[in-house]
Image: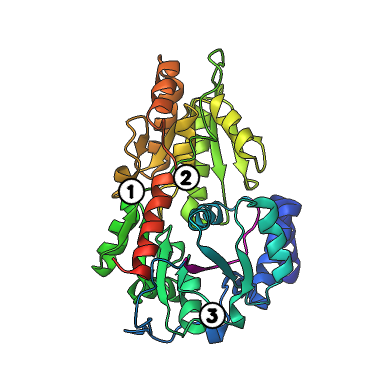
Amino acid sequence: MSGARGLLARARRARDVGFAGIAQRLAQRAYFRTGAAELLFNLAFADIMTDVPQELPVPAAHLPRTRPMSIGWVSTPPAPGSGGHTTLFRMVQALESRGHRCILFLYDKHGLDVAAATAVIRQHWPHIDAEVRDITKGAHGVDAIVASGWESAHLIVRYAQQAVRRLYFIQDYEPFFYGHGAEHEFAAMTYLLPFRRIALGEMLDGMIRAETGLDNDVVPFGCDSAAYGPPADATVRSGIVFYCHPGHPRRGYQLARVALRLFHQQHPDQEIHVYGDAPRKLDFPITFHGRLTAAQLNDLYGRTIAGLAMSFTNITLVAEEMLAAGNIPVVNDVDLARRVLPSASVRWAAPTAAALAAALGEAVTSSDIDDRAAAAAASVVGRSWEPTKDAVVRIIEEEVYGS
């Protein structure tokens, strides 16, 4: 191709993709050339485990039950609205409410601003009193230390080398956060560590068991039914809702995008509400709400008919929140998932765009929308995080005090 023809071809491509497309291509080139992907890998090179230790030092004797425990929790610095941190901090609150002392050992490979992280926690999770420390300064002064994600398990091996009880509160099957490469293996190896594993729900327990053959302590998946509930009786429902998280593959954004497009083609009269992160490259109309509080979410769930609740590494909290508000969640069908979410009001669908769109379509064209909404809300009445918190407290106390 001649120089002139090449320039003309590039000009046509630039015209076709527009300014946004040009910006994306420039950003992609810079992303790969600068190694920006490393920013998403939140472990310093020296903090990565080189092997799985078969044993780690533990105290020679259990703590007397007359003494309150000191519990360390290892985590990344939380961002406002983080669901994973909210669940974790519920467990911290449960330990504190029983008179135990908790310390949050946070980590940022670029350097942790302890004051800033503490301010975020105090503002957005004011119900916990835990002291905040930088784990790279050491993780001493605790009777037990709890990993909350695969990176934190590596950090415990590195920075908590003293005799201590080690546990692992697992909310997702994290190897599936990645393609089958180094990150996948870094996550998978943590399940082999000599930690006491606490799996959130039977689905996650089954996934870990299938890959490792190891047993786990299983605690029930909870629902904050105090914050979510059905709307006033006169409320007229219409449309559907979708929680959007394009940056996390486990949330199935690309699949949801195709499914929602197909749903719109089949039901153009039904409004599609989207909340969370801004969606990308949609060629059908939506109403975007951004990030919402629990009260705002409950209102949105309560005036829509159904919702798309996607997750491939454990059941999403969104599904039970929708149920509590009388919204019918359409959930991608994954092995073992039905054991965690037993409500008959859930609409399970194969992870294809056609199946998901059909399930949403069936919900919005139903002749008994109000009856279905009432049954959905009734199916989770009384559900809470209290059984989960009680189970986690019992397991940690048993580990520190002895059975």
Q: Count up the numbered dots.
A: 3
Please state which of the two labelled residues, at mark 1 or mark 2, is closer to the viewer: 2
Quick one: label 1, few (<14), some, or many (20+) residues within 10 Å? some
Q: Amino acid at mark 2?
A: Leu
Side (left or right) of 179 relative to 204: right
Side (left or right) of 361 relative to 8: left
View extreme (front): residue: 66
Residue 253 visible somewhere in the drawing: yes
SS at badge 1: loop
Specify whether residue 202 is painted magenta.
no
Going 46% across and 74% down the picture, which residue do you hit? 143
Give the quadrant of the C terminus.
Answer: bottom left
* Figure check: 244 above or below 369: below
**Color theme of the render:** rainbow
Q: Nearer the viewer, residue 2 or 14?
A: 14
Q: Nearer the viewer, residue 109 or 219?
A: 219
Give the magenta-colored segment's residue range. 68-80
Residue 261: percent from the left, percent from the top?
53, 36
- According to the image, label 1 marks what residue? 334
Please state which of the two labelled residues, at mark 2 or mark 3, is closer to the viewer: 3
Give the quadrant of the N terminus.
Answer: bottom right
Distance between the alpha carbons at the discs numbered 1 and 2: 15 Å
Circles 3, 1 touching at the beta carbon (< 8 Å): no
First of labels 2, 3 by sequence position:
3
- According to the image, label 3 marks what residue? 140
Q: Amino acid at mark 3?
A: His
Residue 286 visible somewhere in the drawing: no
Residue 235: percent from the left, percent from the top?
56, 16
- According to the image, label 2 marks what residue? 317
